[in-house]
Image (cartoon, helix red, strand yellow):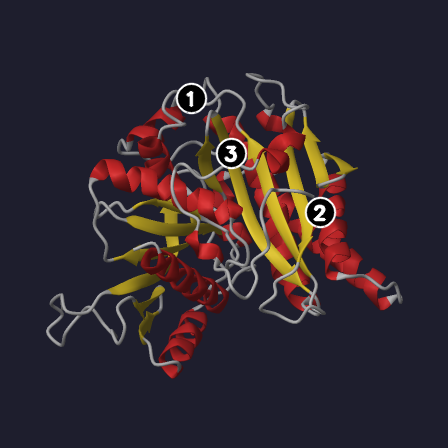
Amino acid sequence: MDRNITPVNSGERPCRVLGPSQPSPPNLLQPCVSVFALGKKINVDRLPTAKNCLLYLVVSLYSQACKTCSGALMTEKDILVGTIQDFCRQNGLSCSNVESGLLLQLGNQSVSVAIRPIELQSQSTEDLVWEVIVFAEVGNPVLGARSPAGLGVWNRYATLLSTVAIDDRLIVFSKFAIYRNSREIVERIYSPLASVAIWLAFGQCMFLEDGDPSAQQFLRGDPIGNLSHWLGITNEDRDRATFITPAMFDEAATLARDRGLVAFSEPTGFSCEFPWDPGASSALIDDGCLNNQQRTSLILIENDVVNPLYGKGVLARIQFKLSFDDEYVAELVNALNRWELDAVNLPPFFGSWCIDAMAPSPAFVAFFPSVFSNIATPVSILSWAWGRHQAIREMMYSDG
């Protein structure tokens, strides 16, 4: 599948691509356009509930495990595709094989799963890497949904998907890579998260289409209370406690401290500082005041946070001690999301870049609704956050 992206080699760094003027990837996004009916709404009643989605994922993964145990030789890609196909059958979604991967449909809405092999010269050429992108196009977005400022606010409420403006198009997407000999990770993390991302993509496109006044509140940054349930999130699911335990936060803090990072855990969350400036360890000194001589990024993982769209869940954020003017930071955030879409060999992209609510600075957020919070643990989220911190830091320094 040609996306007009050159795989990175030992002399290239994928993090150098940044800016609103970078080219869009029309070949990747084309499959969903021909089957998308502009302006028509999804029937919400046809969307499965979150509880049923989780049940279907368990059944699907058990089915894939049985196929493996029965002697069928399945690659990591086979496991991913099989899980998604089973998920679609159980939820009444149409699933077709296309040249770029899979095309899923529910009524007039479509979601695509693009799968392509890539080769990273920095790794052994024997290690096959598959890049996977779950994406959909919003057919008739509400006023302001394509503006960088509106998207910078909307993406604060992101779950596993980012919403990005590419020319006159509005795309929701998530992205990850699967490697050879990573069967357990594909089975336990990536296949379930990809299936949930598909389910969320259908609902987010519906929500951002013309006719839903609640979407305007998000884009303007108005104070927002809890909305009535949508996208299959029932009242029971909204109030459900997460699967994350205090011991999981302790495990993440111990792992970070073992690697020389400043980290703290408590029963409801975890925090860790990543060095931004060379030699930095913490932006706080002993009395808790800011230490302006050291710049760090702050990763926060909080339990039982309430998202106005999805209810309780696990919120992960990366905050940066950077400051820009309001107009530039809005453009920068949209450019960072486009960079994530186009670049090769980045950490799994489940979440979105947005405008930090506390300062005119980019921030990265991800939200795992309670009913799905058993898929990614704090250690997984910490690992992805560290990789993303390293990538953005390298890109910022290399671009001056």
Q: Are marks 2 and 1 in contact (CB under 8 Å)?
A: no
Give the left or right position of residue 233, taking residue 353 as reference.
right
Viewer-closest of 116 and 58? 116
Q: To which quarter of the image does residue 104 belong? A: top right
Q: Residue at x 65, y 22 (%)?
A: 108
Residue at numbered disc 3: 171
> Callout 1: few (<14), some (14-19), or many (20+) C-alpha neighbours within 10 Å?
some
Viewer-closest of 163 and 237? 163
Residue at numbered disc 1: 142
Q: Amino acid at mark 2?
A: Ile
> Callout 3: few (<14), some (14-19), or many (20+) C-alpha neighbours within 10 Å?
many
Name the N-terminal-most of marks 2 and 1: 2
Query: Can you see residue 364?
Result: yes
Q: Position of residue 141 (x, y in %)?
A: 46, 23
Q: Position of residue 85 (x, y in %)?
A: 75, 45
Q: Quadrant of the N terminus?
A: top right
Question: Real-space Cα distance between discs 3 and 1?
Answer: 13 Å
Depth check, mark 3 against mark 2: the one in front is: 3
* Relative to 220, residue 54 above or below: below
Name the N-terminal-most of marks 3 and 1: 1
Question: Real-space Cα distance between discs 2 and 1?
Answer: 30 Å
Furthest residue toward bottom: 258
Query: Can you see residue 91?
Result: no
Q: Amino acid at mark 1?
A: Val
